[in-house]
Image (cartoon, grey):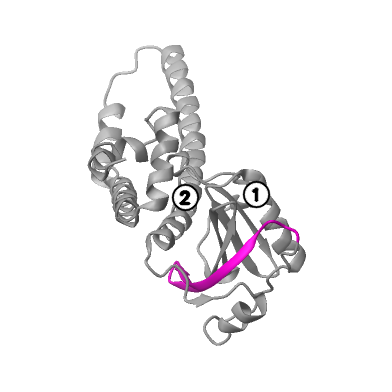
Amino acid sequence: MACESWMAKLDTYLDGELPESEMRSFDKHVRGCPSCAADALARVQMKRTIQATGKRFGPSAEFRKKMQQSIASKPQRRFHAVWTFATAAVLVLIAGILTSSYLTGRSRQDQALSEIADLHVATLASSSPVDVISTDRHTVKPWFQGKIPFAFNLPELQDSGFSLLGGRMAYLDQTPGAQLIYDIRKHHISVFVFQERLLKLPAGLDEISSAPKKLSFNVETWSQGGLRYFVISDTSAADVDSLAKLFKAAA
């Protein structure tokens, strides 16, 4: 597929509004085209920045006071009508607070996973995806010593179907961590490891089972031994879960 036709539908693809067959076709194209992958990453980051900026503004205290005075100045005709209106208003307010709280929490969770997805996509788009190239875990693990403030274990991959390609440094919330790159049936899988206490992560993150749908990734995350793990890839959820279990056992 020519890059010109890809760019024409890039925003529609990122919003998840293309037919399923075209979504799969673009997924395949972006994995093999560093230029388009970089453009996709830039668009995703721009969309997230615009979304975050739009949530910064709310009614000022002066505006709230003006509205309260306007409501209080209206004549109260019948107590029953006022009580009914007040009860309805309270119910609407409570529903709004609960809905806002849920959406805010979900938005923070999606944002955290989107940042992980951005790191994964950036790695795939890079001309040098790994800093230490080796299939030997005993070579890759020592490379991180002195570069990150924690240690972690890499699993044994014999008869698992996974192969280690290497590793590189990664940063989340300006916190240094490790990124390991694995392969299974020509699919790349990123495993991120960070120090849990240094990250600003939302509550309930362990309950998330998939990355934002617009990025078409499967992801699994958990906390273990003071470390936060993320496993993300466009391969099947079963493959992501299998690699996650190997890391959990190794830890």
Residue 241 on the magenta segment:
no
The local crowd at label 2, few if under 14, some if 14 to 19, many if 20 or more residues have their Cα within 10 Å, is: some
From the top left corner, tell me how far across and down residue 101 is, in percent. Answer: 49, 41
Please state which of residues 206 and 177 is positioned toward the viewer in this rendering.
177
Closer to the eye: label 1 or 2: 1
Residue on which the image places disc 2: 108
Q: Residue at x 50, y 32 (%)?
A: 94
The local crowd at label 1, few if under 14, some if 14 to 19, many if 20 or more residues have their Cα within 10 Å, is: many
Residue 198 falls left or right of residue 81: right
On screen, residue 181 above or below 56: below
Q: Residue at x 44, y 30 (%)?
A: 21
From the top left corner, tell me how far across and down residue 88 is, in percent. Answer: 46, 20
On screen, residue 191 above or below 56: below
On screen, residue 235 above or below 35: above
Badge 1 or badge 2: first in the primary sequence: 2
Residue 172 on the magenta segment:
yes
Q: Look at label 2 and name its amino acid.
A: Arg
Q: CA distance from mark 1 to mark 2?
A: 26 Å
From the top left corner, tell me how far across and down residue 140 is, in percent. Answer: 60, 78
Instruction: Considering the whole magenta stretch, tell me its main secondary structure.
Output: strand
Residue on which the image places disc 1: 239
User: Residue 161 appears in which quarter of the rendering?
Assistant: bottom right
User: Residue 7 appears in which quarter of the rendering?
Assistant: top left
Residue 181 has which mark?
Answer: none
Q: Which residues are magenta?
A: 159-176
From the top left corner, tell me how far across and down residue 123 is, in percent. Answer: 43, 63
